[in-house]
Image (tube, grey):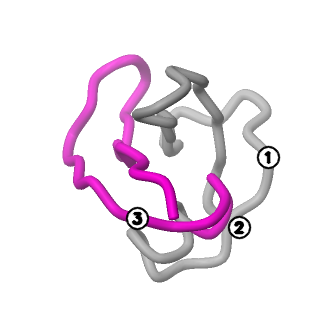
Amino acid sequence: MNPYKVEVMSGEVATSWKVVRADTPFAAVTKATGRTMRDKRSEIHWVRVTDEDERAVFKYAFS
């Protein structure tokens, strides 16, 4: 399992964050938020997931 930093965002400002271990970025965001997610489009409130090992960034929105 990889470490992922999961940040709940309001625009471009992180309002909260936590580090979780999961197999995929999608599993990490679901585990951290406990909510159903989908790919981000142009929402104001969204979630940024950073792969701590690879420094890859993924963007999701609440369903």
Q: Nearer the viewer, residue 36 or 32?
A: 32
Q: Distance from label 3 to label 1 (Cα)?
A: 20 Å
- Frontmost of labels 2 and 1 is 1
Q: Residue at x 51, y 64 (%)?
A: 1
Going by the numbered disc 3, the residue's amino acid type is Arg
Q: Which residue is mark 3?
A: 21
Disc 2 and disc 1 in contact, CB within 8 angstroms: no
Mark 1, secondary structure of its residue: strand
Q: Position of residue 3 (x, y in %)?
A: 39, 51
Q: Residue at x 66, y 76 (%)?
A: 36
Going by the numbered disc 1, the residue's amino acid type is Asp
User: Is residue 6 found left or right of 59 in the rendered image?
Assistant: left
- Corner quadrant of residue 37: bottom right
- The numbered mark, 2 or 1, whose residue comes first in the sequence reads 1
Task: State which region is magenta.
Answer: 1-27
How many labels were placed on the picture?
3
